[in-house]
């Protein structure tokens, strides 16, 4: 078999008037999977999160409080990974990650990519990508 070229993906481009806060390929160990052996040992999961924030005026503030913090989401993901709670599916974990990203009211939508990195030796990872939007409500004028 000839050497395969690495898979590449198109960059995520925020709409005009938005910015995108990125957590790229965060590697953490979770209890995840449907098989008995997966329920007994953690396995590495790669998580990438794109958080879209309205930024119509192009904020020039250098104050962290004026911006969505990737560090807050990373801390919550590390806390979740440290727990002993098990999920069967990458889809379930992706929904949890999306909820963490959307917990900051300034995030209007999030794209979440969750992949198990060790389950298929011939693959860099297997998993799911989801795109979730904030539900309309008082915070966003809907």
Image (spheres, grey):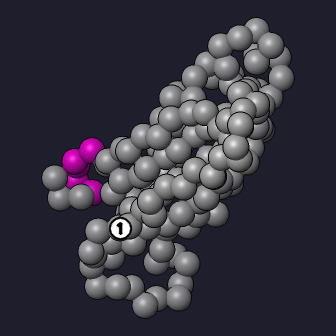
Bounds of the magenta segment = 135-139
**Residue 29 picture location, percent across and down:** 77, 37
Q: Give the overall secondary structure of the magenta segment.
A: loop
**Residue 122 picture location, percent across and down:** 72, 33
- Whether 23 is drawn above or below 56: the answer is above
- Whether 43 is drawn above or below 67: the answer is above
Q: Quadrant of residue 52?
A: bottom left
Q: Which residue is mark 1?
A: 14
In the rendered view, does 5 fall on the left or right side of 67? Answer: right
Query: Residue reaching furthest right?
Result: 41
**Residue 28 picture location, percent across and down:** 74, 44
Q: Quadrant of residue 121?
A: top right
Front-lying residue, 13 or 22:
13
- Whether 5 is drawn above or below 31: the answer is below
Q: Quadrant of residue 59?
A: bottom left
Q: Secondary structure at mark 1?
A: loop
- Whether 19 is drawn above or below 110: the answer is below
């Amino acid at each position: 078999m000839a050497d395969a070229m690495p898979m590449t993906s198109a960059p995520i481009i925020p709409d005009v008037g938005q910015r995108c806060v990125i957590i790229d390929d965060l590697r953490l160990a979770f209890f995840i999977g449907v098989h008995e052996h997966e329920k007994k040992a953690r396995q590495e999961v790669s998580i990438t999160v794109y958080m879209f924030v309205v930024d119509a005026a192009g904020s020039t503030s250098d104050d962290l409080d004026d911006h969505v913090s990737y560090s807050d989401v990373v801390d919550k993901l590390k806390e979740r990974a440290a727990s002993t709670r098990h999920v069967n599916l990458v889809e379930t974990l992706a929904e949890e990650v999306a909820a963490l990203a959307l917990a900051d009211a300034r995030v209007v939508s999030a794209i979440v990519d969750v992949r198990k990195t060790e389950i298929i030796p011939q693959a860099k990872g297997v998993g799911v990508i989801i795109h979730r939007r904030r539900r309309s409500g008082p915070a966003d004028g809907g």
